[in-house]
Amino acid sequence: MAEATELVEETNVDLLLSEAELEAHREHITAFIKGVVDDAGAEGAVLGLSGGIDSTLTAFLAVEALGEEGLHGLVMPSDVNTERNMSDAERVAEMLEIEYDVLDINPVVDAFVDVAPDHAAEDRMALGNVRVRTRAVLNYFVANAESGVVLGTGNRSEAMAGYYTKYGDQAVDCNPIGNLYKCQVRQLARHVGVPDEFVEKPPSAEMWEGQTDEGELGLDYDTLDAILALHVDGPFSKAATVRALDVPESAVEHVEELVATSEHKRHMPPAPEPR
């Protein structure tokens, strides 16, 4: 695939942001976070910290918007989370000097497993989604108790591809970085001072041991971003996208399928039309 800089020359579509645009996004997002909290009459915000780039960037921006006292971080490890990611999550909280708690979700997940039918507990995806939804419940438990809002960490690439758990990591009050493609998330993270080791770390939702985001998506984020920008969000046909990005037609079709099959996630649950 063409590198991001080559994408500009080949398609006249630039996914990378200028310094001025990055600063504008920074100001726009921090104002958005403050506005959500103020409009809700809330006293602050709660954010699940995973040690990944999305939650880390969101934490940095939230502290700019609300101050250290306005953000409460929750680190919620399970038995499939790597020690590095959980320690990175704590490091983010300590770096930003925010209040945080470490909440072990294993007992909660085990309780679900104990009462669920055996075949459900043996389903890796279903069990992974239970872990994600458990974190959402805890986010709201703490936020409700503290009169806070729950900040989400979803980006545009994952929202379009449906790479999130319904009523899990998208059970939030807002998504501050929700309009940014993954490559722009990395860019903005560097711009606001997130250390490179967080920016360059391979992303993983850690729904089960050894999982990676790109392995689950079936293609790398740079390719996903480019296909979404040109073909799904943009005007390029499938054939033009294949030529411009030098990717196989199957890659474009795969992204089309991801978007189509996850359409239900981006809407309220449907009801029959009135009779």
Image (cartoon, rainbow, N blue to C red):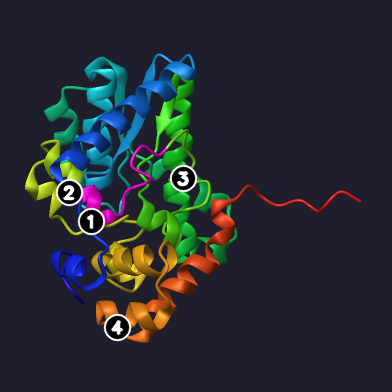
Label 4 vs label 3: CA separation?
A: 34 Å
The residue at which mark 3 appears reads as: 170
Label 3 vs label 2: CA separation?
A: 23 Å
Instruction: Name the residue type under label 2.
Output: Gln
Depth-wise, is mark 4 or mark 3 nearer the camera? 4
Q: Secondary structure at mark 1?
A: helix
Task: Give yes or no for contact between labels 2 and 4 (Cβ–Cβ under 8 Å).
Answer: no
The residue at which mark 1 appears reads as: 183
Viewer can see residue 211: no
Q: Earlier in the sequence, mark 4 or mark 3?
A: 3
Does 118 sit left or right of 225 as displayed? right
Residue shown at the point (24%, 51%) measured from the top left: 184
Residue shown at the point (8%, 48%) measured from the top left: 196
Residue 32 or residue 213, whichever sits in front? 32
The residue at which mark 4 appears reads as: 243
Which of the 4 image quarters holds residue 80? bottom left
Label for residue 187?
2
Q: Earlier in the sequence, mark 3 or mark 2?
A: 3
